Image (tube, rainbow, N blue to C red):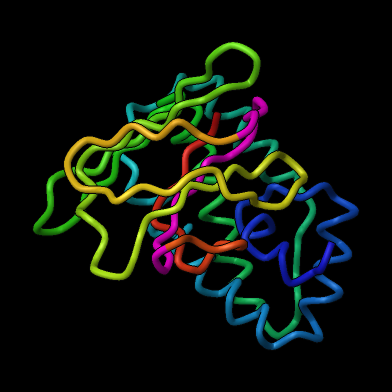
Amino acid sequence: MDAHDLTAAYALDALAPDEAEAYERHLSQCEECREQLAEFNETATALAFATVAPAPPARLRASILDAAAAERSNVVPLLRRRWVARGLAVAAAAVACIAVGLAVSLSQSSQPPLTASVVLGPNGTATLHISGLSAAPSGKTYEAWVIPKGGAPRPAGLFPGGGSTTVRLRGTVPRKAVVAVTRERAGGASTPTPPVLFSTPT
């Protein structure tokens, strides 16, 4: 797979360790991917700290933070400050996502709260439920992406947004995958266009 296609998966920590190391080597030589990754990281940081969730049990929170502290550092010299922000975002998102399960709630200024959840059905089928997302602008559409753990994003469905929306995701959705949404040109895209508007685990 082309390393350029792995930027979104890397930003969401969905690559296997060997894939992540290979991508980091590519990243040190590719200005375009560094710029795209910076946009993904800024969005991930905002999402992590905008999530409203009840506090997890103290023992669970401690074990998550210990695991995050033990995780190896993913550092590219030219982006040292961004990697620090990315590590904080991942730790905050992990605590929040464990507590809320499949749902994520985001507060947007001048808009009703955005909520999204993924419901897994039999045989790997899944449905994405969204409310509070404004309608896509003229010439644009929203696109859902399924990002398997250790894999690249794949397109899983288009939808116009506005009000409450239910999207039956194409293909099978494995457990521990991430479902993300981006805004794309009408007709959709083959790879996600930054920024990621929101994401939720399965």
User: Would you place residue 57 above or below residue 144 in this image?
Assistant: above
Give the quarter of the image for residue 123: top right
Image quadrant occupied by the N terminus: bottom right
Q: Which residue lies furthest to the top in this view?
A: 122
Depth order, front residue of 124/100? 124
Q: Residue drawn at (56%, 36%), measured in percent from left and top? A: 170
Residue 76: x percent and y percent?
76, 76
User: Would you place residue 196 above or below residue 30 in this image?
Assistant: above
Depth order, front residue of 81/9? 9
- Look at the image and say whether residue 184 sits in the magenta stretch: yes
Residue 5: x percent and y percent?
71, 65
Q: Residue drawn at (33%, 27%), measured in percent from left and top? A: 54
Q: Is residue 105 left or right of residue 22?
A: left
User: Would you place residue 87 above or below residue 23 in this image?
Assistant: above
User: Would you place residue 51 above or below residue 56 in this image?
Assistant: below
Give the quarter of the image for residue 68: top right
Q: Residue drawn at (46%, 21%), measured in percent from left and top? A: 119
- Look at the image and say whether residue 99 sits in the magenta stretch: no
Q: Give the range drawn in magenta.
A: 171-186
Q: Residue furthest left?
A: 110
Q: Is residue 195 left or right of residue 6?
A: left
Residue 186: x percent and y percent?
39, 65
Residue 83: x percent and y percent?
63, 68
Q: Residue drawn at (36%, 59%), measured in percent from left and top? A: 141
Q: In this view, does 19 lie to the left or right of 60?
A: right
Q: Residue furthest front?
A: 187
